[in-house]
Amino acid sequence: MSEASLAIAVPPFDVPRHVAIIMDGNGRWAAARGLPRVEGHRRGVEALRRTVRAASDIGISVLTIFSFSSENWSRPPAEVRELMSLLRRFIRHDLADLHRSHVRVRVIGEREGLDPDIAALLLEAEELTRENERLTLVVAFNYGARQEIARAAQRVAAEVAAGRLTAQGVTAEVLGRYLDASDLPDPDLIIRTSGEQRLSNFLLWQAAYSELVFLPIYWPEFDRAALEGAIVEYRRRERRFGGLAAKTGS
């Protein structure tokens, strides 16, 4: 789908404000072509670059990517090392371009226990781009939704123990304030590639009223046309948020 066709099908004010993506299928893409899994991950980085550019051009405000889950540490050590190497190269090589494109980088997930150089790179990305406003790129790294909710509950428990909050005052709204990047809007649209139809511990709290679009293509094949197609599908949905009247997420 071309940029012109998207403009006709999805008026700018109807573009979802926040899109989240589960980037799935790198290994299967490589295996289908007789290539090593690492080549799938490398091609996945190229797909990420395309997607960030497309999201910025289309007018999406927040793009969240599931880059590395807390469960991914159980993968073979060689694959984990390669994934960390790709992250390092992405930040070192792409951060300047992201900054010039006015992209703000945010990182969610557990940072305790990360290699010091990885933790430093994540912090550098956030600090350098802090004032950018065109697109917020949220990188879910060493992230698991259940772990995020547990961390939020621990913070709330500490507030109760300190007397700054009562148990009766713990509401869904209050707990939500202690989640990672709680200042950002919940995702309007969550896309998963590879044909799998599950959230896999991704943004479980924030996805309560998100529209879900599952695409049969592997992540390295994802491009602007795939993103535009998912947005067109999103616009076909009626978002009621538990009520009777449809609402728009933009």
Image (cartoon, rainbow, N blue to C red):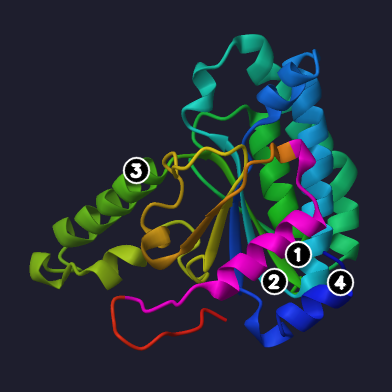
Task: Choose the circle earlier in sequence order: 4 or 3.
Answer: 4
Q: Secondary structure at mark 2?
A: loop
Residue 196, placed above or below residue 232: above
Residue type highlighted by circle 4: Glu
Instruction: Look at 70% across and 71% down and name the residue there.
Output: 60
| Label 2 packing within 10 angstroms: few (<14), some (14-19), many (20+) | many
Mark nearer the viewer, 2 or 4 = 4
Q: Is residue 237 magenta?
A: yes
Disc 2 from disc 4: Cα separation? 14 Å
| Residue 130 in view in this figure | no
Disc 4 versus disc 1: nearer the observer: 4
Judging by the rendered image, the residue that carries numbered circle 3 is 146
Residue 40 position, x and y percent, is: 76, 26
In this picture, is 54 found above or below 13? above
Query: At numbered mark 1, what does the secondary structure look like: helix, strand or loop?
Result: helix
Task: Tell me, yes or no, whether the highlighted magenta stretch contains residue 56.
Answer: no
- Whole-angstrom CA distance, mark 1 to mark 2, is 5 Å
Q: Residue at x 42, y 59 (%)?
A: 207
Part of the protein shown in magenta? 220-241
Q: Amino acid at mark 1?
A: Ala
The location of residue 149, given as percent across then percent down, is: 33, 50
- Quarter of image, res 89: top right
| Mark 1 and mark 2 residues within 8 Å of each other at the beta carbon | yes
Q: Which numbered disc flags the more N-terminal residue, 4 or 1? A: 4
Q: Which mark is residue 60?
A: 2
**CA separation, marks 3 and 2?**
27 Å
Left or right: residue 125 compared with residue 164: right
Q: Residue 55, labelled with which disc?
A: 1
Q: Which residue sits at x=70%, y=39%?
A: 219
Q: Say whether disc 3 or disc 2 marks the residue closer to the N-terminus.
A: 2
- Between the C-alphas of marks 4 and 1, the distance is 12 Å
